[in-house]
Image (spheres, grey):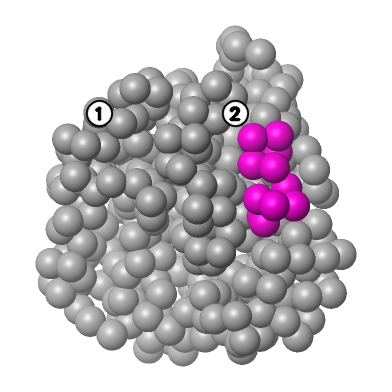
Amino acid sequence: MSIQFGVSPIAWINDDMPELGGDTPLENVLKDIAEIGFAGSELGGAFPKDPAVLKALLGRFNLDLVGGWYSCELLTRDAEAEIAALQDHLALLLAMGSRVFVIAETSNAIHGQMQTPLKDRPHLDEAGWARFGARLSAVADYVGARGLKLAYHYHLGTVVQDAADLEAFFRHTGGNVGVTLDTGHAVLGGIDPHQVIASRPERIVHVHCKDVRQPVFDATAGKDDSFLNGVLAGMFTVPGDGSIDFDRVMQGLKAIQYSGWIIIEAEQDPAKADPRTYAEMGLKTLKDAARRAGLVEAVAA
């Protein structure tokens, strides 16, 4: 097995809320990421999109580009139109040697709306699931033929949020449609990440590790507030600073012989939670848990 640890730059520069770290120089972010000990970074909004420029920049810090979020709109357009729309993003990932294509349906999502309560998030009926699943499976076929694994990211505020949604998702998509196992979105969305690991090992092609502060969620987005206000209040944090058992997560990944990237992705207000300090805490937590689980034979401290 080959496990690599990476990070999302969202803790430094938040793409959904530019007021959070938006004035942070990208080179400072990459310097932190490299010095902490991560092998790669996911794509952020502040990253240059010219492959030659991005390669040179990441090369200075000896970092790989892991992949990057792509917002699809398969509820409003067919697979052919989506494939046409994703070409620039796919070309960048291919040029950078990325192995996963992280994707999420956002045509009717409410996670980016500050004033919309999370409880008002969208739902699909059976016909909607069938149509969405068929279109997503066709996109996965295309992405797979180009050499990348499609890794669907279930997410609070979208049509794939809770356990029933995820089961419908699995039922209506082909085996070529992988998922990004996101621990934080799972727990707060009512999905048991340990059960997903055990029951759908063949679908897990990418891993995002974030921890949660359940009481904060319960008082904000889990009640009457929006997803973004929940983030601002601190419902997410890094592994080791919340309630998720990452020893059990790593044991589960070991049991299914997971091979690939494990990414720390925990959006917080950088003015309240220093990104470097928290990323260091998160990486140490994951490496220690991975050692104890035997997921890796040896990981540098």
Q: Is residue 8 above or below residue 140?
A: above
Q: Is residue 147 left or right of residue 14?
A: left
Q: Is residue 83 above or below residue 147?
A: below
- What amino acid is at disc 1? Ala
Disc 2 crowd rating (10 Å Cα; few below 14, some 14-19, many 20+) is some
Disc 1 crowd rating (10 Å Cα; few below 14, some 14-19, many 20+) is few
Q: Position of residue 49 (x, y in %)?
A: 24, 48
Does the magenta run of residues contain 76? no
Label at residue 70 = none
Q: Nearer the viewer, mark 1 or mark 2?
A: 1
Q: Is residue 215 left or right of residue 12?
A: right
Q: Is residue 53 visible?
A: yes
In the rendered view of the protein, which quadrant contains the C terminus? Answer: top right
Label at residue 254 = 2
Q: Residue at x 40, y 23 (%)?
A: 61
Q: What SS does tag 2 mark?
A: helix
Label at residue 56 = 1
Does the magenta run of residues contain 277? yes
Mark 1–mark 2 distance (CA, rounded to whole Å): 34 Å
Query: The magenta stretch spans which residues?
Result: 268-279
- What amino acid is at disc 2? Lys
Q: Position of residue 221 (x, y in %)?
A: 72, 75
Q: What SS does tag 1 mark?
A: helix
Label 1 with label 2: CB-CB less than 8 Å: no
Q: Residue at x 38, y 86 (%)?
A: 128
Q: Earlier in the sequence, mark 1 or mark 2?
A: 1
Q: Position of residue 85 (x, y in %)?
A: 18, 68
Residue 165 image-quadrant placement: bottom right
Q: Residue at x 59, y 24 (%)?
A: 36
